[in-house]
Amino acid sequence: MQDRLHILEDLNMLYIRQMALSLEDTELQRKLDHEIRMREGACKLLAACSQREQALEATKSLLVCNSRILSYMGELQRRKEAQVLGKTGRRPSDSSSPAERSPCRGRVCISDLRIPLMWKDTEYFKNKGDLHRWAVFLLLQLGEHIQDTEMILVDRTLTDISFQNNMLFTEVGPDFELRLELYGACVEEEGALAGAPKRLATKLSSSLGRSSGRRVRASLDSAGGSGSSPILLPTPAVGGPRYHLLAHTTLTLAAVQDGFRTHDLTLASHEENPAWLPLYGSVCCRLAAQPLCMTQPTASGTLRVQQAGEMRNWARVHGVLKGTNLFCYRQPEDADTGEEPLLTIAINKETRVRAGELDQAPGRPFTLSVSNRYGDDEVTHTLQTESREALQSWMEALWQLFFDMSQWKQCCDEIMKIETPVPRKPPQALAKQGSLYHEMAIEPLDDIAAVTDILAQREGARLETPPPWLAMFTDQPTLPNPCSPASVAPASAWTHPLPWGRPRTFSLDAVPPDHSPGASRSVAPLPVQRSPRSRGLCSKGPPRTWLQSPV
Amino acid sequence: MSYIPGQPVTAVVQRVEIHKLRQGENLILGFSIGGGIDQDPSQNPFSEDKTDKVNGWDMTMVTHDQARKRLTKRSEEVVRLLVTRQSLQKAVQQSMLS
């Protein structure tokens, strides 16, 4: 039976390859080929694995490859359908209607993902006995693109699951749906039957007590999710550890913000599931979006601007429409060299634009007037274009920009910074993670010295200089409190890359994670920037009180 | 060495678990908290413990009122804190050097 399934699977792959070839869609075809090869490699690796942790990595790669193949196949089918429909000459009924305006594409980046855990009191503090461990990873899908995070090992000593990855999706429309799914698997063999020979295991499973029997039954059930089907296909016939869908959520444009936000997670597995983790029910992340209209010029050309005052003195400039500004440079080269423009006109949701033909200006009657309201004043700039065609193309670009701003909403207020993700290192050999809790039980009121003894033994002498966080206990902070929002972010702010780090708690009992610990993370004084807007905090000025409350 | 309020920092912490006491029909912890991101830190008469996390909630960027609310939830009988204090670093250093 297994052999037949194998043959069927191989046949499927062959068919998929042929389909891709027939469509002559070289990019998608290349991606499909790549995934198919990766999948074959993952299958071979899984068969050759001896260690559970290697098997977990290989299974994860296999499952992700399968899902990618499926999603590319779906995309191929859609394109094939569109091709066929186009060829048969079917036209929409109202062919005379003007082309629908479509919003510009953009880039969406999600980073600093963190999922808090909520351990029950008995498990959290009295950590005696075996440390139960889980392997988890996040799968993200936007359109036909699927990205996965690294696999992280979780145990009772972690308060949240933090992923260091930063994932970028390109060619995204403002109506995007980013689906996030959390998958988990036990690192130890599932059920209470690990190590028991197979025959004994089957005998035992039919005569187990209530709770463990339920657990065994739950693990034998298929891993299908309730409601919409999960991105990940069920485990193939190859065998190996099983990943279960633990939670999911979908993020859209409304969730985009230039800062950290917390979103709700829909929990998908129940306590009987062997891979169940006590999730708090939310996920924190930074979801940023950069529409192309904000980062790339949408129109440029020669214009004439009226100089200040009543005089009919028109200066010839090179105008560039980019983001929410119309920059007027003295020369076309200035736009590239970074010279300051002669004039910058703001173009935002409140701006009003009118095209007109002036009789008074002989020779160049085609004008564009741009009005902005600043408080009670209205400022209007009048620009002359070279010809009627030029005027029309400027107006078209402006209408497109207004449309894009209405579709991309808050993403067009200011450019959100997106860092290009670093290519991920291949998963390194996983060392067995122990825990201090294995070595001793720590009562909350115990002597600090006992704990630090253990720490010293494990890590050796380090850190001659006092770490930066001790400065929290000195009387005055060294820089003024940056909680008061700056009125205008200076243009030079974008040249300083802000470290998008979060406060990290370095517990005495957890093994330090792979990324650089406190000593090497620079907390250099930065110029005063906008305050991080997590949870919508925004104070109106430097705080003057010190409140104390009984709890 | 500098610490800027509002910027990320890595610190050594200790876990503390407190079971609330019953006083009449309320559950109380029995101590007071001061400060918050909306308070003036220079007026702090103590410089002892700083709380990073309460029952999984991040406390590093909260106002005084939010912190008080998170500690006084009626439904929770146990409060788990992640706390940092100056003496932690001294203790760590002393044991390193010895």
Image (cartoon, rainbow, N blue to C red):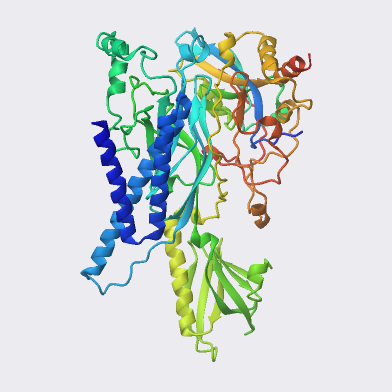
Count every numbered label the image shows and give the total.
0
Q: Is residue A470 visible?
A: yes
Quarter where residue A280 is shown: top left
The quadrant of the rendering that contains the C terminus of chain A is: top right
Q: Is residue A180 visible?
A: no
Q: Position of residue A356 (x, y in %)?
A: 47, 81
Give the answer, above or below, for where A67 lies relative to A184: below
Residue at the location (33% across, 58% down)? A21
Q: Position of residue A210 (x, y in %)?
A: 28, 10
Camera-side residue of A280 and A272: A272
Q: Is residue A138 left or right of residue A209?
A: right
Residue at the location (36% across, 60% down)? A25
Residue at the location (36% across, 21% down)? A274
Camera-side residue of A7 and A432: A7
Quarter where residue A6 is shown: top left
Give the answer, above or below, for where A517 lies relative to A118: below
Give the answer, above or below, for where A89 lies relative to A212: below
Quarter where residue B67 is shown: top right
Q: Position of residue A498 (x, y in %)?
A: 64, 45
Q: Position of residue A367 (x, y in %)?
A: 51, 81
The quadrant of the rendering that contains the N terminus of chain A is: top left
Q: Is residue A289 left or right of residue A13?
A: right
Q: Is residue A99 left or right of residue A391?
A: left
Camera-side residue of A244 and B1: A244
